[in-house]
Amino acid sequence: MGLKMNKKIKKNIKNFIQIIIINLILFSSALAQNPYYTPPAKDAALKALKDKIEPVFKLVFGLSGAIFVVVIIVGGLQYLTSAGNEEAVARGKKTLTYGIIGITITIMSYAIAGYILTKLGSDIPDIIKP
């Protein structure tokens, strides 16, 4: 049983590494700078809109990220301190699952917000700066 599991794990790791290598080869051109890129026009209205939206994005993503990290920590502590109690184990796993789902949604929303701010003329690093 242990030997079969070991082979299965090695096969999964090998497949994962192959997928990463293939993605790096196929999509490495996407990492290069596009010489034909023209930045969006920066009129006053777009700049004013960006200046109003950007702080809200920073606040929302900062708070939601912090909240979900705390949820993950609480779920982990619940799971670790369950002492074999089935209900406590289930509650800890459920809390961990919700925390991971929440942080995933937050990260995906951050990417969408970064895209929107880029179209409004903002630089992505400006969102990250405190």
Image (cartoon, helix red, strand yellow):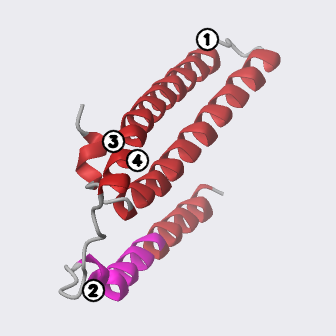
Q: Nearer the viewer, residue 99 or 105?
A: 105
Name the front one of labels 2 and 4. 4
Dot 2 lies on which element? Answer: helix
- Gap in angstroms between the C-alphas marked 2 and 1: 48 Å
Mark identifier at residue 29 = 2
Write down the residue under mark 1.
81
Q: Residue at x 46, y 70 (%)?
A: 16
CB under 8 Å between discs 3 and 2: no
- Gap in angstroms between the C-alphas marked 2 and 4: 33 Å
Magenta span covers which residues?
16-31
Mark identifier at residue 51 = 3
Q: Mark 1 or mark 2, which is nearer the start of the sequence? A: 2
Name the front one of labels 3 and 2. 3
Dot 4 lies on which element? Answer: helix
Q: Position of residue 48 (x, y in %)?
A: 34, 46
Membership of 17 in magenta stretch: yes
Q: Mark 1 or mark 3, which is nearer the start of the sequence? A: 3
CB under 8 Å between discs 4 and 3: yes
- Looking at numbered disc 2 in the image, what kind of residue is underneath it? Ser
- Gap in angstroms between the C-alphas marked 3 and 1: 46 Å
- Gap in angstroms between the C-alphas marked 3 and 2: 32 Å
Image vertical order of residue 127 relative to residue 94, above or below: below
